[in-house]
Image: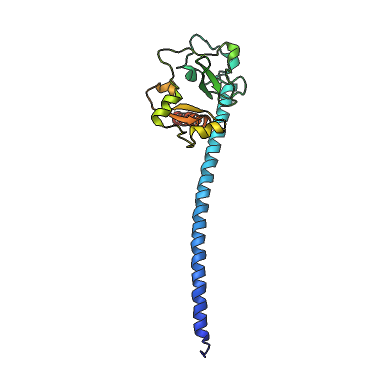
Amino acid sequence: MTEFDPIRALREEITGLADVHKVIAANTRRSEAKLAEAEAEHNALLKLDAFMKGLLEEQRAKLQGDGGRGWQGMTLDRNTITRQNALEVLADVACPACSNVGNYQLFDEIANGGVGVQCVGCGKHHPFVKQHVMWLRGEDKRRSNDIAAVAREGGAYCYSCGLTFEELLSLGIRPVVHHTRPFAEHGEVSRKIPVCGRCHELMNFMQRIHQQLLKRQ
């Protein structure tokens, strides 16, 4: 019968505790790394939130100040506003429905082949109908939004969320064409990609935010 060795038993217990400590220390380091990453993301979101609040206040002040061009105080000429210059013309104009300033996009009406203005802030189509601005005339070029042709070239799925056209339609979301560089500034020279309607709004929004950041430098 082996005689009990208290020293050996103590060493084995210490070894076991050391192994447990290594595992706990490794988990602690991983948790600290995740915490640091979460804090960095949180700080970035706080900065973005502060920037957006400042931008919103600045635009509201511009709207209310003497230099702001509220929609009530300006006249939109439907004979001069076109598909090509509409977003530029409306850059400092508040939406009559929600008061968001310059937050517009163009949309295509398949039924009549027309192009109109939509407020991204409230989603209203034709926000300037009272000023007789509905369907925009074209100049020497027409925005190409042939989703079938774009899908044949690049694939029938959203380049942002990755859902196929079939999956999107099952959710009631229609695929659309996105110009990788803003059409109002670059026309048809940039590549066009297929995206879903929801991702399209987010991508257009980020394009506008980045342009605003560049102008503030």
In the image, 118: left or right of 146? right
Give residue 66's position: percent from left, percent from top: 57, 19
Q: Nearer the viewer, residue 139 or 87?
A: 139
Give residue 64's position: percent from left, percent from top: 60, 22
Q: Is residue 32 above or below residue 136?
A: below
Quadrant of image for the C terminus: top left
Please, which residue is most extreme toward the top here? 79
Q: Is residue 136 above or below residue 204?
A: above
Give residue 164's position: percent from left, percent from top: 48, 34
Q: Nearer the viewer, residue 130 or 73?
A: 130
Give residue 96's position: percent from left, percent from top: 61, 19
Residue in the image at 55% along x and 33% along y: 170
Please, which residue is most extreme toward the right here? 97
Residue in the image at 55% along x and 37% along y: 50
Residue 119 visible to an observer of this rendering: yes
Q: Quadrant of residue 183?
A: top left
Please, which residue is most extreme toward the left here? 189
Q: Is residue 41 above or below residue 78?
A: below
Q: Nearer the viewer, residue 57 or 124?
A: 124
